[in-house]
Image (spheres, rainbow, N blue to C red):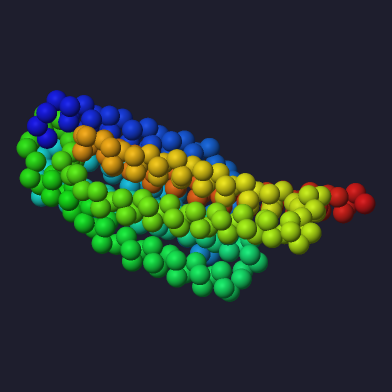
Amino acid sequence: MNSTQDLVDLQLGIYIQVACLSLLVYDTLLNIDRELNYIWRSRWSLVKCLYLWARYAAVLDTAFAVTKHFVLGVSPTGCARMIFFDNVFAALGIAFAEVILMIRTYALYKKSRKILVFFILMWICLVVTNVWPVLQWARSKALAADTSLPSPLPSCDSTESSSNIVLVVYISLLCMETVIVLLTVWKGLKLFWNGSFQPRRYSDLVTTFYLDGMFWYLGMLVILVVNVFLQTTAQQPAIRSIANTPMGVLHSVFACRLVIHVRHVAVEEREFGCLVRKAI
């Protein structure tokens, strides 16, 4: 870290991470009542475990990413270990958040065994494909931190890593999410072609499944395109990875909202149905 521009870029990164942490805390507090009703009071399941991981692992990881900038007296080796842990932990959060999106689409296909096998194989391929790039990229940032010059900022971070291997992660994520959203669209089109699409028969629950999935994809598409653009065009190393924290945070926010929203709509429909039956 040897230039004024590096310090400015690093400071910008800190501001973005603080903003992301604020967003996570705000979203958690905003939905705390629904979370208590639909998550904590529900029975334990895979979705519940994934939700809690996506919600609170993201908060811890982002808080750690912010805190490491202000830890004083850390050796270059200790700083490198912190950076390596931060990047690998964030990647795990994204990988598990993707499972929530797969489960949602799996439900749309009425728990088809073929879809289940396909998703399991696709997720395994995603993890296997990205393990080496994520580890190499995290090591490159950690090595840069270990060998970089002391900074006048109280920051445990690196602005020197310029590895483009992380592009493999961005592109594979984009491909997988595109496949999932295409399966969602295909299911809707298939219902339409078969003459099964009758809007009056479709509940808010089904509509929520489709709309929430599309919003997820559009949000992830934007942040992934931004990441690819910065990684391939930005001249300053710190700017290339400046959108990584927002990507992990958005995965957490969207994944948790998918779960809470669909459960909220399901409960509302059930309660409304009971009221109608009693009135009749």
The quadrant in which residue 75 appears is top left
Foreground: 53 or 174?
Answer: 174
| Residue at image coords 57%, 47% | 214
Q: Is residue 277 above or below residue 226?
A: below
Query: Is 124 rendered above or below residue 275?
Result: below
Q: Residue furthest right?
A: 280
Q: Which x, y percent locates residue 163?
A: 21, 48
In the displayed structure, does residue 269 sit left or right of residue 71?
Answer: right
* Residue closer to the observer: 26 or 94: 94
Left or right: 210, with 201 as reference point: left
Can see residue 228?
Answer: yes
Q: Residue 24 in the image: state x and y as whole percent.
A: 43, 40
Q: Residue at x 44, y 66 (%)?
A: 122
Front-lying residue, 37 or 115: 115
Residue 280 placement, left or right of 211 = right
Percent of width and height locating residue 126: 38, 62
Q: Quadrant of the N terminus?
A: top left
In the displayed structure, would residue 245 be above or below residue 13? Answer: below
In x, y percent, where is residue 155?
A: 17, 36
Side (left or right) of 233 relative to 199: left
Give the number of marks.
0
Residue 59, visible in the rendered structure? no
Q: Residue at x 51, y 43 (%)?
A: 218
